[in-house]
Amino acid sequence: MTTTGRRALLLAGASAAAAALTGCTSGEPEPRRPSAAEEAAAREAERVARAEAALRRRAVAASRTLLERYDAALAAHPALHARVAPLRASAAAHVKALGEGDRPSPSPSTATPATATTAPAPAVPADPKAALRALAAAARTASDAHTAELLAAPPEYARLLASVAAAGAGHAYLLTEGARA
């Protein structure tokens, strides 16, 4: 073999060894570390998600409180059923639309003492007209709570909150002024 031949052979062998060593790596590139801007964006997205989740919990709580008031009034004054039941059904739909439907909750028939709520039922005035006024006040309170959250809500949820707030104002009217018409 000539010197040129040996060199070519050594070069070919070195190239093959380098290729073999390269093939022995995991084949995955080094993980790229996120930049400071990417980390800041991720933290901000997490903060926004937490704020939105808290907003949704508050909205559901306000509507659930109103629903509990409807239930207590109906239990205390069954004669108001025809007038109050449709509004109660609307309040139940609001609870579900605002986020309650995303979480499974035990139905009254399957609730055990450990999972059942222990909060006392809201007080209901003995006079049916006073009970209606109290329901109207509760509807206004829930409506005001939803209205107060509008600026902090993302656009789609803000539209839902606005609709529920308007419905609450309508409930208050129907429970008081609407009866006079």
Image (cartoon, rainbow, N blue to C red):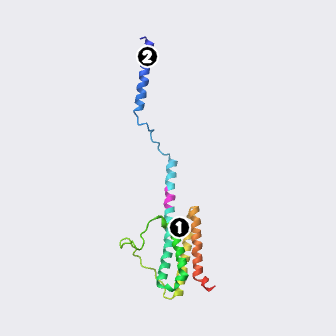
Residue at the disc numbered 2: 7
SS class, disc 2: helix
Of residue 59 and residue 16, the one placed in the foreground of this image is 16
Q: Residue at x 59, y 76 (%)?
A: 169
Span colored in magenta: 46-51
Q: Is residue 90 left or right of residue 11?
A: right
Numbered circles on residues, count: 2
The answer to if 47 sits in the magenta stretch is: yes
Quadrant the C terminus occupies = bottom right
Of residue 139 and residue 83, the one placed in the foreground of this image is 83
- Disc with the residue nearer the chain's start (1 vs 2): 2
Nearer mark to the viewer, of 1 and 2: 1
Q: Residue at x 42, y 15 (%)?
A: 6
Q: Residue furthest top?
A: 2
Q: Amino acid at mark 1?
A: Ala
The quarter of the displayed image where residue 145 is located: bottom right
Q: Is residue 51 left or right of residue 25?
A: right
SS class, disc 1: helix
Residue 15 drawn above or below residue 40: above
Residue 91 drawn above or below residue 124: above
Query: Could one spot residue 133 in this view of the protein?
Result: no
Q: Amino acid at mark 2?
A: Arg
Residue at the disc numbered 1: 97
Q: Residue furthest right?
A: 181
* Number of residues whose C-alpha sits closer than 10 Å to that of mark 2, classed few (under 14), some (14–19) or many (20 or more): few
